[in-house]
Amino acid sequence: MTDTKIPDDHPRAKSLLAREKLINSYLKGIVAASGLIAHGRGEAFDYLLGEKTSKPALEAVEAAAAMFLTAKNPVISVNGNTAALVAEEVVKLANVTGSKIEVNLFYRSRARELAIKKLLEKARAREVLGVGKNASAKIPELSSERRRVDPRGILAADVVMVPLEDGDRTEALVKMGKKVIAVDLNPLSRTALKASITIVDNIVRSAPKLVETVEKLKNQDVGKCREILRNFDNRKNLAKSMILIRENLSNFAAERVAERGRAM
Ligand code: ATP
């Protein structure tokens, strides 16, 4: 285990803490080596997004909350990175939305499945699907280990949340007629483009926001959820995140030019 002390006042403390969590989870066999690389890609986009939850991300969070609340059989699919970063929020979200939790891994091994299950149970998950023989069904058109799903979970689900996912499985789930909620900092990824709703935000920030939004929306008429879903357009929402990145880059560039001007 690493025991590096990250000072609270370090300008990148949050980001460094997330890295520590991932490295320690990698050392415990929860996160795959490629999960560390995927996190790095996410961090790069987070920088460009200003490392805060944007307005379009909040709109997607609201739509995702509405989708959960109108679902008959929602499932939250959990991989190593998601478990390492937000196990407690996943359990809270499952409780407030009546969702099942299922482990689904690209690099599937019995040890990794069990380590993730243990972490989720420590976060008080009542049941964790998709482990061992329970992942007995297959998603058609997928050849990776991600095709293996639990017949009581993802196979039967109408809505599947897939945080930090790859594009192939998102596409396969959509082809099976399921609604897919993705969380992906990269608005250009295949996952982001294929999902029904893509929350372009760091899972560390958006998972608690999603729980909070479901709790608020739960007290309202179901008609409100349907209206939110009718008004949400994932392609337009992704475009807003792309425009935000462009604006942020222009602003960063303008600031550098202004600094240079002041220095002369
Ligand atoms: P695709 O197949 O969808 O084009 P990919 O090949 O990048 O994407 P993965 O390697 O599985 O797929 O990457 C997972 C995605 O998760 C990356 O796009 C990355 O931006 C995103 N990601 C990583 N960490 C986080 C995080 N903490 N919060 C949100 N998204 C994240």
Image: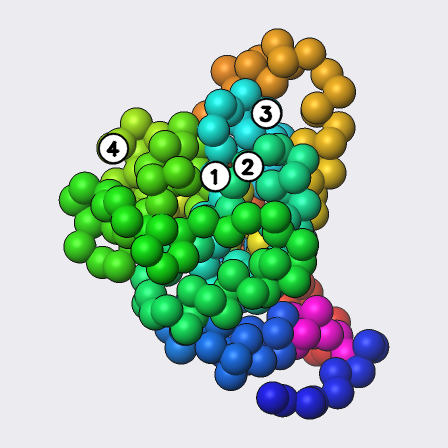
Q: Residue at x 67, y 58 (%)?
A: 123
Say which mark, if any, is on residue 75: 1
> Which label sits in the foreground, 3 or 2?
2
Nearest the eye: 264 or 180: 180
Query: To which residue does mark 4 refer?
Result: 175
Question: Which residues fall within the magenta stretch?
Answer: 10-17
Which three-letter amino acid code belongs to the residue tagged 3? Leu
Q: Earlier in the sequence, mark 3 or mark 2?
A: 3
Q: CA distance from mark 4 to mark 3?
A: 22 Å
Q: CA distance from mark 2 to mark 1?
A: 5 Å
Q: Residue at x 33, y 65 (%)?
A: 108
* Residue 170, horizontal then vertical, whole percent: 33, 43
Say which mark, if any, is on residue 7: none
Q: Main secondary structure of the magenta part?
A: helix
Say which mark, if any, is on residue 99: 2
> Which label sits in the foreground, 4 or 2?
2
Q: CA distance from mark 3 to mark 2?
A: 10 Å
